[in-house]
Image (cartoon, rainbow, N blue to C red):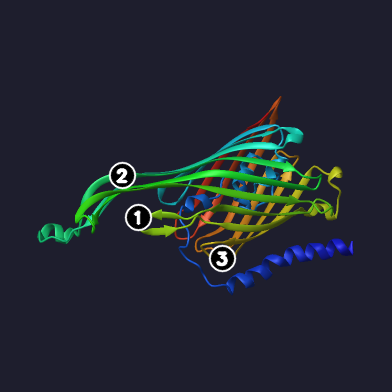
Amino acid sequence: MRKAIFALLIVALLPFLGLNVAQAQPIKYAQAGMPFLKIDVGGRAALAGTQIGAQGDAMSVFYNPALLAQADGIQVMSSITNWIADIKHYGMAASYNAGNLGTFALSLIWMDYGELRRTVPYLGEDPTLRNIGYIDQGTFQVGEYAVGVAYARWISSQFAVGGHLKYAHQDLGSVVIYDEIRGENRTQKNALGNLAFDFGTLFYPGFKDFRFGLSLRNFAGQNDYYNQRFELPLTFCFGVAMDVMNFWTPESDRNMKLTVAFDWVHPRDYSERQHVGIEYSLANTVFLRAGYKFNYDEEGLTAGAGFHKDLGLVGLNIDYTYTSFGIFDSVQRFSLGVAF
């Protein structure tokens, strides 16, 4: 009992110790591109995007691919996020557990920015256009997506690993630039793609259902737009989680769980962050979730609910997530999944 209390205190205090360390680090603004790769996908976002807080499913491919080893049977899941500024974010994942061969998965995310208006500064002498300040060149669309394949496997009864190889593409439209070598204007198309890799681990040390894991996401080479170089949002994360009701009642004697999860996140383009999430599940049917993200400019509180129902040979999952976003509108997420 004393060991259990000590372990619980350590887990509870680590996020606050990490918060002090994060506040002492220099801020690293704007050192990465393709930020759509960082947006949370699916119901796990209600747990502040913690890596291992909930049971692994097909959507785990976007967080920690090692959790795919926990995804049973065949699962197909999709989500839609009403992002800020009327932007839509879509995600889809499918997984197949092949037993001793491991779990295989496919992933896809894409963004919908709608139509954007292109303008250029006006530097001529027309008084009307000088008052406006720019020339309207019509509308254009931005395209962003990432598609990938993943694999996860239990190395032992306590240790799982997983990897996720993806191709990320971005098309920001074309612009007219002045070519100093040729001495003329030319159209520059701003589109590129890059291969990226995610890696994750999951380990159960043997103390009740306590587990921890780490993930490295968006490991890739550099990208170039004309003469501007940038990198993808490389992110390292370490997380722990546990059903704290195990301290008082064995899982076999109850039909509910209360899982608490903590993540320590080290992104390339910001100082260290902490995510805290909690999930209450009743009879593996109703799920209530909440979380908080520390050291963010606008994001903070997250909350949501989920519902699971077995319909014969098919399992149905429905999830909703709310995220506060400071001066912006709140972000709403909806996800639907089926399992066979």
Mark number, residue 226: 1
Q: Quadrant of the C terminus?
A: top right
Position above or below: 133 against 141: below
Q: Position of residue 258 (x, y in %)?
A: 75, 51
Give the residue type that dot 2 points to.
Answer: Phe
**Residue holding disc 3:** 295
- Can you identify the residue that label 2 sits on? 140
Residue 233's x, y, as percent? 52, 56
Residue 183 lies left or right of residue 314; in this view the side is left
Depicted 160 relative to depicted 316: above or below:
below
* Numbered disc 1: secondary structure: loop
Quarter of the rendering containing residue 293: bottom right
The furthest residue to the left: 126
- Of labels 2 and 3, the one closer to you: 2
Name the residue: 86% across, 48% down: 250
Q: CA distance from mark 2 to mark 1?
A: 19 Å
Say if residue 168 shows up in the picture.
yes
Q: Label for residue 190? A: none
Residue 18 sits above or below residue 291 on the image: below
Mark found first going from the N terminus, 3 or 1: 1
The quadrant in which residue 254 appears is top right
- Residue toward you, 315 or 156: 156
Q: Amino acid at mark 3?
A: Asn
What is the residue that sits farthest to the top in this orientation?
312
Q: Decide: few, some or many residues near mark 3? Use Cα within 10 Å; few <14, some 14-19, many ≥20.
A: some
Query: Does label 2 or label 1 sit earlier along the sequence?
Result: 2
Q: Position of residue 329 (x, y in %)?
A: 45, 54
Residue 60 higher or lower than 32, as above or below: above
